[in-house]
Amino acid sequence: MAESADMEQLLTAFRKFAVHGDTKATGKDLTGKNWAKLCKDCKITDGKNVTGTDVDIVFSKVKQKTSRVINYEEFQKALEELALKRFKGQSKEEALQSIHKLVEGREPTNVGVTKVAKTAAVDRLTDTSRYTGSHKERFDDSGKGKGREGREEIVENTGYVGAYKNAGTYDTKIKMWI
């Protein structure tokens, strides 16, 4: 009973990592990137016995030649290979149980993935009240962007040159001559 519950948790962890970062993923196949993330997040890679290179080599070893992903059975083979490297002093069964305990029930972490930089330099550079020149014209008094009106000069198709001072006087001059 405990074995099947543990395997169910392992399968759940596999599926969660399989769909991480891919909206089209079905949860049946694990990519190399997500395999490396699983090993890092579950602390299988320790930097001494198991490194990122070892993780990539095991992934290439267990996947099919023409495939870019591994299924659940290949995932279990990969865990077996890494278990022997990660837990060197233990027997094969003990090492496999130890590595399963690291993975079971885990899900991908998003810690530190999206941080908003809020420093004095960023505040200074994004303060619209300090903008000068043509950049100042792109924002209203509250600091909200004006959109297209702030970016482009709106062209008036009146037929006169922009700096022409006597615009609209042509008709009056012509009437004087007639």
Image: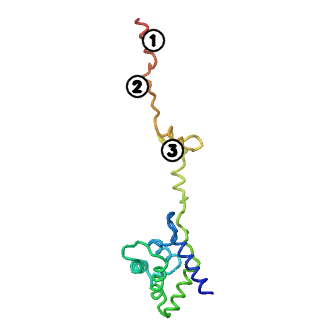
Label 3, on which residue?
131
Asked which quadrant contains residue 139, the reply is top right
Residue located farthest toward the top when viewing the structure as drawn: 178
Residue 118, given in percent of the width and then of the height, sits at: 55, 58
User: Which numbered disc, 3 or 2, marks the residue closer to the eye?
Assistant: 2
Asked if marks 1 and 2 touch (Cβ < 8 Å), the reply is no
Residue 7, given in percent of the width and then of the height, sits at: 57, 82
Residue located farthest toward the right when viewing the structure as drawn: 1
Mark 3–mark 2 distance (CA, rounded to whole Å):
30 Å
Look at the numbered disc 2 and give the secondary structure of its residue: loop
Q: Amino acid at mark 1?
A: Thr
Specify few, some or many for label 3: CA neighbours under 10 Å numbering under 14, 14-19, or 20 or more: some
Q: Amino acid at mark 2?
A: Val
Residue in front for this viewpoint, 94 or 143: 94
User: Along the horizontal axis of the image, is 138 left or right of 2?
Assistant: left
Asked if marks 3 and 2 touch (Cβ < 8 Å), the reply is no
Look at the numbered disc 1 and give the secondary structure of its residue: helix
**Rendered position, 37 above or below 142:** below
Look at the numbered disc 3 and give the secondary structure of its residue: loop
Mark 1–mark 3 distance (CA, rounded to whole Å):
44 Å
Label whose residue precedes the other's in the sequence (3 or 2) = 3
Q: Amino acid at mark 3?
A: Tyr
Label 1, on which residue?
172
